[in-house]
Amino acid sequence: MKILVVGCGSIGRRHTANAAALAETAVFDVDAERARDCASALGVRSFPDLEAALNWTPDGVVVATPQSSHLQIARMAIESGADVMIEKPLSHNLDGVEMLLDNADNLDRKVFAVTNLRFHPGVEAIRNNLPEIGKPLFAKAHFGSNLKDMRPGIDHRRLDCVRPDHGGVVLDNIHEFDYLMWLFGDVAEVFAVAGRLGTLNIETTDYSCSALRHESGLRSEIHLNWLQRPKRRGCEVVGSGGTLIWNSNGKNPERCEVRLYPAQDQDSRVLWESHAVDHNRPFVVLMEHFLAALSGGDTLLSSGRTGARVLEAALAACRSAETGRAAVLSGAPSR
């Protein structure tokens, strides 16, 4: 099995290290020096251009470049005969997404979206214990972290995620949309507010609050910001028979607890906890799933079409915040 990672930034290097432990691995980056440095540090091969890299005939290609370049690289990869896994989000807008997926279908190639948060112990514990709380009624997901802490040593104003056309805090944290839709189904309608509330001196949103109506009728909320310290992430799911609460605090280390509160007057119980979550484990499991999918096995990875629906929901939140009106997704059923 041969894996090519395109893009040698921080996330590309992580994917490369994990792939190299499982398969023959190579890298390409438009910055040739960065590619050579990554290859040397991780003991893999590098290529001087993308054409040469694809002529190496990789079985799978991981696209870990700025989001506006995702579709072009993915198209070249599937046309070369490779299956593809694209870093979140699939793109910065929906232009060309359907065409890419149709092309992949025609060529019998697989497209996946990176969904590493599905393998976080907090999300895993929520999913595995949903039957404990009866019928889910509503859910609240949240993520907050100070943008200046994202890449130590790098000016936060130079990060790709703050480009005005890259969706701000919403698209950068599209994982929350993904796992809520994974747990509770597709979204029919979104109403959101967003803004640039802090003093980060960026040209895009640093705060967002979205209310989602799922096609099942369940309601969920997503609160996102790039302003707070400490870093926090989590989710609450309230059901007819109890409540599940996941809380993660901090980054290095990350302290995580998932607790079940029964509907009756009973003591809560801890379902999972750690004072130092292994940040790399979800990415390792994700890469294992990608390799299994390349061999025709089952996977919990988001398909390209699921990733497109998640992207549509996140973009609907951005559109709603801009217009001040609820955004209805294409093909959504009426109320």
Image (cartoon, helix red, strand yellow):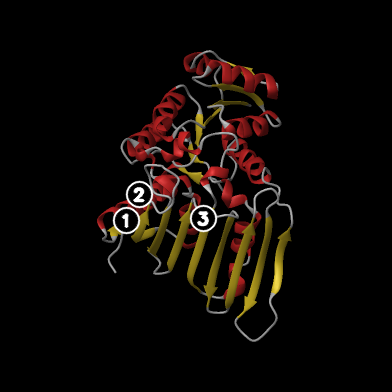
For the residues bearing labels 1 and 2, Cβ distance under 8 angstroms: no
Residue 212: image quadrant is: bottom left
Residue 122: image location, x then y, percent: 63, 58
What is the quadrant of the N terminus in the image? top right
Q: Residue furthest right?
A: 275
Query: Which badge, 3 or 2, comes first in the chain's sequence?
Result: 3
Residue tagged by mark 1? Answer: 321
1 or 2: tag closer to the N-terminus = 2
Circles 3 and 2 in contact, beta carbons < 8 Å = no
Q: Which mark is residue 315?
A: 2
Q: Secondary structure at mark 2?
A: helix
**Labels 3 and 1 touching (C-beta < 8 A):** no
Which amino acid type is marked by label 2?
Leu
Kind of residue sitting beneath label 1: Ala
Q: CA distance from mark 3 to mark 1?
A: 21 Å
Q: Is residue 38 left or right of residue 6?
A: right
Element on which disc 1 rests: helix
* Circle 1 or circle 2, nearest the eye: 1
| Residue kind at label 3, given as amino acid type | Tyr
| Between marks 3 and 1 in the image, the one whose residue lies nearer the viewer | 1
Q: Earlier in the sequence, mark 3 or mark 1?
A: 3
Gap between marks 1 and 2, in whole Å? 10 Å
Position of residue 174 measured from the top left corner of the image (x, y, whole percent): 46, 49
Residue located farthest toward the front when viewing the structure as drawn = 199
